[in-house]
Image (spheres, helix red, strand yellow):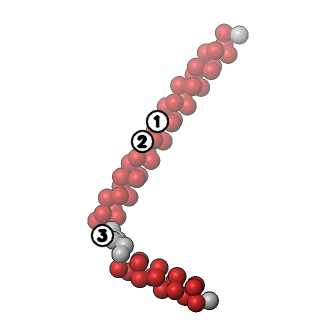
Amino acid sequence: MNKISIYLRESYRELIEKVTWPTWTQLQQSTVIVLVATLLITGVVWVMDLVAQQALKFIYSLF
C-alpha cells in the first residue's frame, strides 16, 4: 500500500510542478487547427472516394 501512496503523491507533484499546461488562447488555437485539419482530410478522402467510385463504374461498364 505504501508504494501506491508514494506513486500517487509523486504523480500529483509532477502534474502540479513539472507539467506546463496550455493557456486558454493556446488551447483555442490548437482546437481550430485540429478542426481545420480534420475537415481537410475529410474532404480529401471524400474526393478520393468519388474518384474511385467513378473509376469502378467505368471499369464495370466495359464488361
Could you say where residue 62 lies in the image, as x and y percent from the top left? Answer: 66, 9
Residue sitting nearer the eye, 4 or 35: 4
Viewer-nearest of discs 1 and 3: 3
The residue beneath circle 2 is 40
Disc 1 or 3, which lies upstream in sequence? Answer: 3
Q: In the image, 49: left or right of 25? A: right
The residue beneath circle 3 is 23
Quarter of the image for residue 1 reads bottom right
Spatial CA distance of label 1 from label 3 is 32 Å
Could you say where residue 21 lies in the image, as x and y percent from the top left? Answer: 35, 71
Question: Quick check: marks 2 and 1 in contact, CB under 8 Å?
Answer: yes
Spatial CA distance of label 2 from label 1 is 6 Å
Q: Is residue 60 above or below residue 3?
A: above
Furthest-right residue in this view: 63
Spatial CA distance of label 2 from label 3 is 26 Å
Q: Residue at x 58, y 19 (%)?
A: 55
Residue sitting nearer the eye, 45 or 22: 22
Q: Which mark is residue 44?
A: 1
